[in-house]
Image (cartoon, helix red, strand yellow):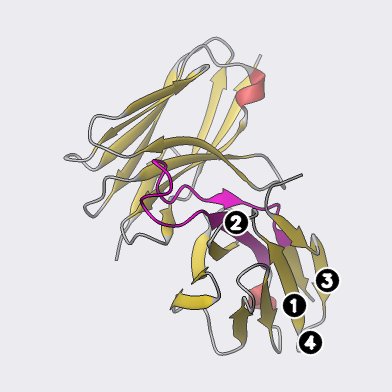
Amino acid sequence: DTGVSQDPRHKITKRGQNVTFRCDPISEHNRLYWYRQTLGQGPEFLTYFQNEAQLEKSRLLSDRFSAERPKGSFSTLEIQRTEQGDSAMYLCASTPGGREVTSSYNEQFFGPGTRLTVL
Amino acid sequence: ELKVEQNPLFLSMQEGKNYTIYCNYSTTSDRLYWYRQDPGKSLESLFVLLSNGAVKQEGRLMASLDTKARLSTLHITAAVHDLSATYFCAVDASGYALNFGKGTSLLVTP
């Protein structure tokens, strides 16, 4: 399977614990995005990387959240001191990046998501 | 702040009927995407609309974009049960973040 993969698919944790999620984008996709989706809502942008550089962060990304993409391939999203309000589906997406690469500019391909439940 | 509004949010329709889902957005953009999401699943890309007047069709679904009206439509023709899902439109006004609507939950009944 050459799509975007995420691990774990489900995570249940207690309030105050730290959690880390992993995303593997489609091979050779330069851009990687993180979104959060709560029940009954559309995904909301959190942050994105161009290769290993984190270029934008949403104001939704509080200080308890940190994302990395150290080698420009996979990415991790860590949430420290989880709160019940962090319960959501965390989605990762990737694109080739750059107008010259594809006519479907910024068409984002999503992974299966990690569903986080904070008790 | 870019706002993306879909309507209706819930739609129950009989098999064989036609219907249109509307997506309005609040800022200038010529890049709009439609996604499908099944319960508990991730998002599947359906259509990419990159210019005013763009029209794309796939099976019983047809999407169009009017950038002057800031409006996209997703038209369903002769609905079948397999089309039951949640449909999202997403607007790209920044070059990176997609701004999604709340989604239209579609249920096709016999």
- For the residue labelled by badge 4, is the local secondary structure a helix, a strand or a loop? loop
Residue interval drawn in magenta: A88-114
Whole-number angstrom distance, CA of label 1 to CA of label 3:
12 Å
Q: Which residue is mark 3?
A: A12
Image coordinates of residue A94 in percent, x first then y, are: 56, 56
**Residue that numbered label 1 is attached to:** A20
Is residue A92 highlighted in magenta?
Answer: yes
**Considering depth in this image, is B105 or B35 the residue closer to the camera?**
B35
Write down the residue under mark 2.
Answer: A28
**Side of B83 where A98 appears, left or right:** left
In three-dimensional space, the C-alpha distance between marks 1 and 2, rounded to whole angstroms, equals: 23 Å
Q: Nearer the viewer, residue A25 or B79?
A: A25
What residue appears at the point 76 percent right and 80 percent down from the top-left corner? A19
Relative to A10, is B107 above or below?
above
Horizontal placement of B19 versus B66: left or right?
A: right
**Residue tagged 4:** A17
Q: Numbered disc 2: what chain?
A: A
Q: Amino acid at mark 3?
A: Ile
Measured from the top left, where is residue A114 in percent x and y?
Answer: 73, 62
Distance CA(mark 1)–CA(mark 4): 10 Å
Task: Determine the secondary structure under disc 1.
Answer: strand
Q: Nearer the viewer, residue A57 or A44?
A: A57
Would you call the spot at circle 4 few (<14 residues within 10 Å), some (14-19), or many (20 or more)?
A: few
Sequence order check: which comes first, mark 3 or mark 4? 3
The residue drawn where x is 81% and y is 64% is A8
Q: Position of residue A57 (x, y in %)?
A: 46, 77
- Residue A82 image point, x, y percent: 71, 83
Q: Chain of mark 1?
A: A
